[in-house]
Image: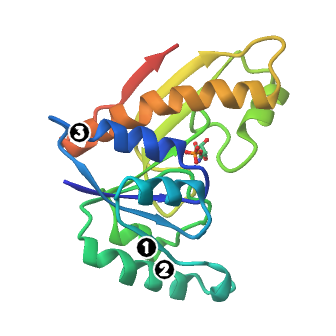
Amino acid sequence: KRVAIFLSGGGSNMRALVEDMTGDHPARPCLVFSNQADAGGIAWAKERGIPTEVVDHRPYKGDRAAFEAAITEKITPYKPDIICLAGFMRKLTGAFTDQWAGRMINIHPSLLPKYRGLHTHARTLEAGDTRHGCTVHEVTAELDDGPILGQASLEVHQDDTPETLAARVLKLEHQLYPACLRRFAEGNREPLCIKA
Ligand code: GRF
């Protein structure tokens, strides 16, 4: 299986995915794609000799259909079987998600269905939750929705701040996402549950 990874930032989840895709893994990275030319993840992929492509969203100014058409044009030659969203910070429309239905997955830093969208760590603390974590799910037209492929959870500490919590959850993401991608590439959609 050929995997395209989409990111907008440092790409630590992308690195975890790429580093796992060796040996007997059923998939290999074919492309790292970003809407940000200066994303740290793009530089890292280039150093590793992984193909990279960028489509800057800014010239499209809210014309999501045109932005997505440009993405499709850039990624099609790499013939991806699976798209992994890994900190890709642009919303995708139903037209794009439908085209990739059952073939596109995402990681989100909360225990979905709780806290879709942004600021998940602060919202967890505000709510006084005792557990928090991350979720890998199939991507559908609704933001941070779709069938759950795996969740990893940890205990919230009394003295946690959004930053300390984010750092611990990110480490869990690096375990959960590769494990879920492996299973997904093998056709296993049984939800995985990791407790830290
Ligand atoms: C992660 O917390 C991911 O769950 C969220 O964006 C962050 C990306 O981090 N969607 P990185 O770029 O993978 O380091």
Q: Which of the 4 image quadrants contains residue 71?
A: bottom left
If the picture is divided into quarters, which one holds ligand 1?
Answer: top right
Q: Is mark 2 within 8 Å of ligand 1?
A: no
Disc on the earlier residue, 2 or 3: 3
- Which of the two labelled residues, at mark 1 and mark 2, occupies the earlier sequence position? 2
The amino acid sitting under disc 2 is Glu
Helix, strand or loop status at disc 3: loop
Which residue is denoted by mark 3 in the rendering?
22
* Mark 1 residue type: Phe
Q: Is residue 146 above or below residue 115?
A: below
In the rendered image, the vertical position of residue 6 relative to residue 12, given as above or below:
below
Q: Secondary structure at mark 2?
A: helix
What is the three-letter code of the residue carrying label 3? Thr
Asked if disc 1 and disc 2 are in contact, CB closer than 8 Å, the reply is: yes
Which mark identifies residue 68? 2
Q: Which residue is mark 1?
A: 96
Gap between marks 3 and 1, in whole Å?
Answer: 29 Å
Residue shown at 32%/36% (left/top)? 20
Which picture quadrant has residue 187?
top left
Q: Is residue 24 left or right of residue 133?
A: left
Instruction: Kindly report the distance in space between the C-alpha atoms of the residues bearing marks 2 and 3.
Output: 30 Å
> In this orientation, which residue lies closer to the viewer: 118 or 71?
71
**Neighbours of disc 2 within 10 Å: few (<14), some (14-19), many (20+):** some
Q: CA distance from mark 1 to mark 2?
A: 7 Å
| Front-lying residue, 31 or 106 | 31
For discs 3 and 1, the disc positioned in front in the rendered view: 3
Answer left or right for 28 relative to 15: left
| Residue 181 x, y percent position in the rendering | 32, 41
Residue drawn at point x = 49 percent, y = 42 percent: 13
